[in-house]
Amino acid sequence: TLAKDYYQIEADYVYDIGLTPNRSDATCHLGAAKDIAAYMRIHKSWTGTVNTPDTSKFSATGALDLKINVANTEACPRYSGILLENITVGPSPDWMQVALTAVGVRPINNVVDITNYVLHELGQPLHAFDKEKISGGAIKVKCLPEGTIFHSLDEVERKLYAEDLIICDGNDTPMCIGGVFGGLESGVTDATKCIFLEAAHFDAGYIRRSSTRHLLRTDAAKVFEKGSDPIITILALQRAALLLQEHAGATIASEIVDIYPSPVQPIEVVMQYDKITKVIGERLEPSQIHTILQAMDMEIHAEDDASFTVKVPTNKADVTRDVDVIEEILRIYGYNTVPIPAQLRTHMTFQQHPTKRHIRNTIASYLVDNGFNEMMGLSLIESKYYPEANELVHINNTSNIHLDVMRPDPLLSGLRHVAHNLNHQQSDLKLFEMGRTYKQGEGYEEAEFLTLFLVGKTTRGSWNVTETMADFYDIKKWVRELLERIGVESYQIKESEDGAFREALSYARGPIELVRFGSLHRKTLEKMAIDQQVFHAEFNMVQLIAAAQKKELRTQELSKYPSTERDLSLVINESVTFDELLKIARGVDKKYTQRIDLFDVYRNEEQLGKDKKAYAIKFLFQGKDKTLSDKEIEKVMTKLISDFKSKAGAILRQ
C-alpha cells in the first residue's frame, strides 16, 4: 500500500512564482488566474471565464450595533465590516489546512485560517476582532499621538508613531495597527463567540511606513503596500462570512457596513499607437492591442486613428502611465515574440583620451592578470564600527537591523571580506574592489574608490623557490605599476598620517591625493578580529581617472655600449626620504644615469647618531652613443655627492 493512499494524501501541485513588487494584481490566486487567462485567450484561443467564489447564498439582516468612525480617510479610503455571532472556535477543515500549508501559512484555528484563506484567494486582508473586547461600543480609524503604547499580538510593547493608522475602540484604545498587525487584547481566542470582521482598503504609503518602522512584515502589509483593490472588500466579507457559517457555525448578525466617501475611480490612460511601436520595437495592429488589453479586463474607448483611451482596473495599482500599459501589453504579447533584427547597425566613435569605463576595465584586467581576485562588498555596515563619526548616512534596514549605515570608507567593509577568507583557511590573499562610499555633510556625498589588500605569502615555497611573505614594498610595487599601467607617471610622494595605518605613504598631485597605501595598524585589524599583517591601498577613483592619460607604446634601441655601476652609502637624517634623494640625483644627470636603486637601509644609533639612517644606493650608467670613461662617471658621482650634501645634508658613510 502506498503511504499516500494509507494516509489519504491527495496529489497536488504548488507553483512558486517570482512576484515583482509592482504586481499588485497578482498577490492572490484569483489575480494570478486572471493573468493566466489573459495569456490563454491571446495565445491558446481560450474562451472560458475565470470563476470567482460563489457568494449568491449570502444573506444578512439587522443593523450593526457598533458605531464606525473613519477619521483619516486619506489613510483609509474604504472601511467595511460585518458582525458574526454564535461562533465555535476550533480547527479548520483539513482541505483548508493543506491549502494554507502549501502557501507557507501555519494553520491556527478556523476563524484565523478563514481570514488567511480569503487573503490568499482574493487578495483582500481581513481582520477579526472579538466583539466583547471592543469597549465604548464603537470603532475609530485614526492616528494616535506619538509615543502611545500598543500591546501587539506578539506580546511586544510598541510605541506608536504619529503617522501610524490605528483601529481603536470607542475609548481610543489601540486594538490594531491598521493593515499591519493585530493587538494582544482584542484578538480571537478559543472563548470567542462573536466577532467583528473588518475588510478595508488602506493607503499603500501609510502601510509601508508603519510596517517597516515597526519591523512587522506581515502578509497583509505586503499586499496593502503594493496597492490593494478597493472594490473587493464586500466580496471578501461575503466569502469569509459564508465560510465561517459553514465551518465555525457562525450566524450573520448584521448587514455589511461600508464607509466609502470617495470611491476610487479607474485610471484612464491615453495611448499613442506610435509610442507603443517605439517602445516595443515592433508594430502591432490596433485590433491586436485592443484584444490583449480586453483580455486583461481593460476597457477601450475614445479611439481614433492615432490614439485611444484605456480604463485600467483598480486591481492594477502600478499601472498609471502609458509606459505601464505598454508593459502590460508586451508582457502578455510575449517578450520573446518580438523579433530580433537580422542586422544590427552601429557607428564608430573616437575619443582622444580613454573613457572611464576603459580605465576601469584596464585596471581590473591588469589586477586579475596578476593574481588578484575581485571582491564585491556590501554598501551597508554596522554603525558600531564608527562610534565617533558624525557624517554617517543612516538607513532603516528592516531586513538586517545591524547593517544600519552606508559605508563611509572602504577599509572596514574590505577587511570584513579579508576576515571571511582567513576564517575559511584562505591565508594568502590578493584582493581588490571598486565601489562607492557615502557620507552626509551639507548634503549626501558619494565617492568612488579602488582598494587593494595583500595578506600572507606572495610566493609559495617549493624545492627550488623560497617562500616570501608580503611586505610594505609589495603593496608599493602594485600601486606604482598600476599607476604606470594607466599612464600616471608624475606625482609627489609623502608620508601619510592616516591613523588606520602603522606606516603609510601617499601619492598626490598638489593637494589632490591619488592613493594612500601601507601596512594597517593592529588596532584597525582588531575591529574585524584579524591577527595577522594586512597591507592595503586605497585609490581615489575619480582623481585617478582624471589623472590617467592615454598610454603610448614607446620603444628604444638597446645600447651596444657597456654599462658601469657605482655604489654610494649616505648617512642622512631620519626625516629624509629616498624620493627626495631620487629627485636630486635625477637633477644631476639624465643623459647617462639609467637606473637608481635603493638596496639597503641601515639604522644604528651608536654608530650613526641619533635620528640618523644610512641608505645604500646603486647607480647604473650607460651611454647610448659611446663607452663612458671613468673620468666622465667620476664627474657625475662627484656632483651627486656634492648635491646630496648641500641639498639633503647627507655625508658619505665611512
Image (spheres, grey):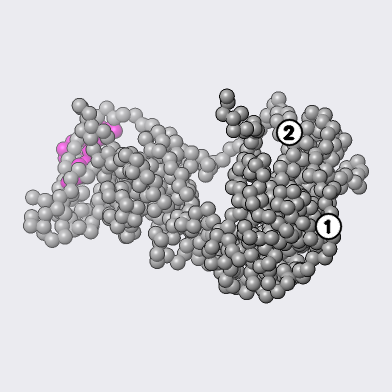
Q: Residue at x 78, y 47 (%)?
A: 322
Q: Residues within 10 Å of mark 2 (few under 14, many from 20)?
A: few
Q: Quick check: can you spot residue 339?
A: yes
> Of the residues shown, which amino acid type is indicated by label 2?
Gly
Task: Identify the residue under disc 1.
Answer: 60
Q: Secondary structure at mark 2?
A: loop
- Name above or below for residue 10 compared with residue 603: above
Q: Residue at x 73, y 31 (%)?
A: 338
Please give left or right for residue 298 compared with residue 361 in the image: right
- Residues 344 and 325: in front is 325
192 part of magenta stretch: no
Residue 423 at what x, y percent from top left? Answer: 33, 43
- Name above or below for residue 578 compared with residue 337: below
| Alpha carbon separation for disc pair 2 and 1 | 46 Å
Q: Quadrant of residue 209?
A: bottom right
- Residues 13 and 285: in front is 13
Q: Residue at x 74, y 43 (%)?
A: 30
Image quarter (top left, top right, bottom left or bottom right) of the N terminus: top right
Residue 517 at what x, y percent from top left? Answer: 34, 51
The stretch of residues the image draws in magenta is 616-632
Residue 228 at what x, y percent from top left? Answer: 72, 53
Q: Residues within 10 Å of mark 1 (few under 14, many from 20)?
A: some
Residue 11 at what x, y percent from top left? Answer: 64, 31
Task: Identify the residue under disc 2.
Answer: 334
> Of the residues shown, which amino acid type is indicated by label 1?
Ala
Q: Residue at x 64, y 72 (%)?
A: 173
- Residues 535 and 398: in front is 398
